Image: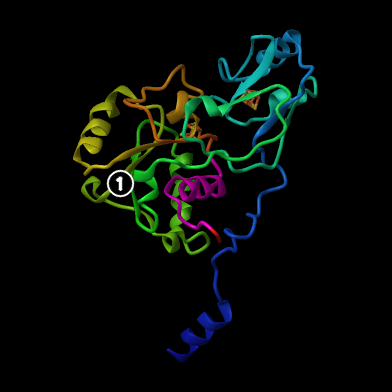
Amino acid sequence: MLKALVARFKEGCGTGAFPPAAPKLPPDFKGRPEIAADTTEEDVKAMRAVCPVADALFFRDGKASLDMGRCIFCGRCAEVCGKVRFTGEYRLGVFRREDLIVKAGEKEYAPPVQTDGEALALEGSLHLREVSAGGCAACELDANVLGTPAWDMARFGIRFTASPRHADAVYLTGPVSANMQLALEKTYAAMPEPKFLIAAGACAVSGGLYKHGNLPRTPSLYIPGCPPHPATVLEALLRFCGAGRGK
Ligand code: SF4
Ligand code: SF4
């Protein structure tokens, strides 16, 4: 017993300093992209030729744009003509789908501020019911690590729950395959009001690598990535419910 206590004491606290410290991201982490202001339609065509996702890149109204909701952050486009660059900005969660579109020439970025009072009222107690709806399981795994001591999202009152009856939000991953549509609807229906839908990962947001997704309703939070990094997910959840403010 004493040995176990000494071992625990020596081990110390295994929880990372993020937040409030900046997260430790891998050297090859790809965050919010920047697109050069002078990117031409020809450049976009060349990048689209190597992009594995339909319409992640497009040229509209005279501007090159990248849809982070479709992008799987593979980085191939950045190797074509040097017009796209992936930054270390990991704060990618947004409350409106259109805010996932990055346009050429945009440099300044600040993550959107939550204004939904019902979501902010969840500060200190946000319970999530995961619905894995046809994805590859990587999104689920990277959300799962948030419950481990290394990330310990429960210190902010954020937890995954087994029952939709105890949940404030569905944490949706995957493109919502036909066989999962009914299960998703039933899960959402079983939750008490107010309730929210969170779309996590390119599959849930837009279909991603699949042709299209099947979102049953408009999400209150979109978290892009394939899969989103745990730091991206945790920061988005904290901003969504106003938890961790001032830390
Ligand atoms: S990083 Fe995104 S936009 Fe670029 S090639 Fe990959 S999927 Fe396409
Ligand atoms: S977004 Fe990517 S990681 Fe997540 S379920 Fe889809 S394919 Fe898998």
Q: Residue at x 30, y 52 (%)?
A: 161
Q: Amino acid at mark 1?
A: Asp
- Asked if residue 69 shows in the view, the reply is no
| Residue at numbered disc 1 | 168
Look at the image and say whether residue 230 sits in the magenta stretch: yes
Q: Can I make out residue 59 in this image? A: yes
Q: Nearer the viewer, residue 215 or 29?
A: 215
- Left or right placement of residue 80 versus residue 4 in this view: right
Residue drawn at 33 percent across, 43 percent down: 169
What is the x, y in percent for residue 199? 42, 34
Q: Quadrant of residue 101?
A: top right
Which residue is nearer to you in this view: 31 or 113? Answer: 113
Assign the magenta stretch its main secondary structure: helix
93 lies above or below 204 = below
Colouring convention used in this rendered image of the protein: rainbow
Q: How many marks?
A: 1
Q: Between residues 235 and 26, which one lies in front from this camera angle?
A: 235
Q: Is residue 149 above or below residue 10?
A: above
Query: x and y percent of residue 34 in the render?
Result: 71, 29
- Is the CB of mark 1 within 8 Å of ligand 2? no
**Which region is colored magenta?**
228-245
The reply, left or right, for residue 16 in relation to residue 193 is right
**Residue appearing at x 68%, y 16% in the figure:** 64
Mark 1 surroundings within 10 Å by alpha-carbon count, few (fewer than 14), some (14 through 19), many (20 or more)? many
Q: Secondary structure beneath disc 1?
A: loop
Residue 181 image offset from top left, x and y in percent:
28, 27
Q: How far across and how far down the image is residue 20, in percent?
A: 59, 60
**Quadrant (top left, top right, bottom left, bottom right) of the N terminus:** bottom left
Locate the C terminus by quadrant: bottom right
| Residue at horizontal 44 percent and vertical 18 percent from the top | 212
* Residue 231 part of the magenta-drawn span: yes
